[in-house]
Structure formats: structure tokens, C-alpha cells
Amino acid sequence: MQQWTARSQEATTVDALQPAQRRKDFITVPSVFFSDLSEQIKAATKDSHVRAENTQLMLSYQKGQISLVQYKVLLCSLYEIYKALEEELDRNSSHPAVAPIYFPQELARLESLESDLEHFLGSDWRRRVIIPAATHRYAQRLREIGRKNPALLVAHAYTRYLGDLSGGQVLGKITQKSLGLSSKEGLSFFSFPGVSSPNRFKQLYRSRMNGIDLTEEGRREMLEEAVSAFEFNIQVFDDLQKMLSVTTATANQSNVVFPTAAHQSPRVMQFAVGLCVALATVGLGMYAL
């Protein structure tokens, strides 16, 4: 288990689960312009960025238009995604591609998400979560590559963790203000107590990732998977949007994930918080990588 301090200098199911076949025709390794993997990922996902940050979801989030209902359902999906990601990273921690970027003490989100879910849903929160189909597909993909091609976990870890780390403090404040929370309880997801200097940690992380030994084909697959990460997340939040109308209609009939009337937002917002927080690489996060 690695330690780090601030002083360190170093769609459809078929579409979702077959990113390589869908993108091989137009994903190319931009080695002429960028030699570093981190820069290549940024270049390869540029179009996805433009498309994602101009959605109504992102624009709404920037206005702080979120509700407690949405945040709770979002946390449920985040938990499912990070559970799959972190279990596969743990299982493959000695893999030559995974080991350099394996920082569980500094980056792991699972324990924070469990704390947030328990705060909002109670000690029996595991029985009360709602997981949309797209979230299951995303988790399935993470477990699939964990078994078959662990190197591709790097693409998901990089885009998610560094995006979350980049926007965590800002997003935490926006969420706290939007939801009218009097304390930071329920906002652990945004906090990285093991990282004293986010900027310097990101430099270290990029350096470690750029040093991973990949063949040209392996690099191409990594770029395809990074683009796929955006697609999975967009599908997740499309599903969350669709769930909103259902959850609003049944809020008074179920105690699965909804707030009490006293804590409910006066406005019914779209799941804008989802796209920015859980993806985090779309918008604030990835541009800060």
C-alpha cells in the first residue's frame, strides 16, 4: 500500500460493453503531438468534453440547481460504481499497469460514500438503495476489464479520481449550499483528507501513469476506454433523469431513498449534480487534470 505526502515530487448494453468496436475507426493515438498518456487521454476525450459540458445537466449544476432527492440517488449510483472500481483495483494492485497508480489511502471513495449513505438513509441503507440499469452496466464493465484486461482500469481510475480531486472542494461547497446543509455531514465524498496538496498529488499521479509501459495497441485501447468512461457515465445520468419522474411520483409511498417532507427541496431539479460529481471528469474535473 503506497503512501504519499505533499513533499512527493514524483445507450445500449451492447454499445456500452463494446467501446473498442464502436470507436476503433476514429480513435487514434495522438503520439505526434503528445507523448504522455495523460495528454493523449485529454486529447482523445476532447469531443466528449464539449458534448457533455454543454448539456442541460451541466448548465443546471453550475447554477446549483440540485435537490436532496437527487443527491441521495446519486450517492447510491456512486457507491455501486466505486465499489466495482476499487474492488478491482485492490484485486489487481500488483499488476504492472495498476501498481504505479494504486493509492487506496489517498483516493479511495468507498468508505466515504458508505458514511454519506448511512447519514442520509440510516444504518440499513444497503437495503434502501436504488441502482439504475446503466449503473449496473458500468459496474459490470469495470469488473469485466478487471478480470480480462486490468490495465484498462487505469483509464477509469485516472478520469474519475483526478476529476473528483480537482473539483471536490468546489463541488462540496456548491452541494452544501444548494441543499442547505448546516454541516459537512453527508459530504464526505468530496473530501480527500489523505491528500494535503491536490495539485502536487495530481502531478505525481500523472507522472506515475505516464511511466506505464504500454504497446501501441495497449495505448490505443486505453484511449478507447477513457472515451468509454464518459459514455458510461452519461448513460448513468440519463437513467437517473428518467428515474426522477418515477421517484417524485412515489416519494410519499416509499422510504427507499427519499427525504422527509421537511427536508425536501422546493424545486424538482434534473440530475445535474450527477454529471458533475460522479463523472467529475466532465466539466470541472477533467480540464483540471
Image (cartoon, helix red, strand yellow):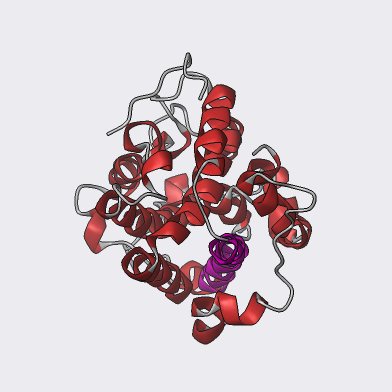
Give how far across and how far down residue 218 sits, in percent: 53, 63
**Residue 221 colored in magenta in the image:** yes
Which secondary structure type mostly characterizes the magenta part of the structure? helix
Picture quarter containing residue 172? top right
The image shows a total of numbered marks equal to 0
The residue located at (32%, 62%) in the rendering is 129
Give how far across and how far down residue 22 sits, in percent: 63, 81
The residue located at (55%, 34%) in the rendering is 207
Q: Residue furthest top?
A: 7
- The reply to whether residue 179 is visible in this rendering is no
Q: Is residue 279 left or right of residue 86?
A: right
- The stretch in magenta equals 216-244
- The reply to whether residue 122 is visible in this rendering is yes
Give how far across and how far down residue 124 sits, in percent: 20, 54
- Nearest the viewer among 187 and 222 is 222
Q: Is residue 5 left or right of residue 238?
A: left
Residue 115, above or below 41 = above
The residue located at (59%, 35%) in the rendering is 166
Q: Is residue 91 left or right of residue 285?
A: left
Residue 223, above or below 176 = below
Picture quarter containing residue 2? top left
Q: Residue furthest left?
A: 124
The residue located at (43%, 29%) in the rendering is 192
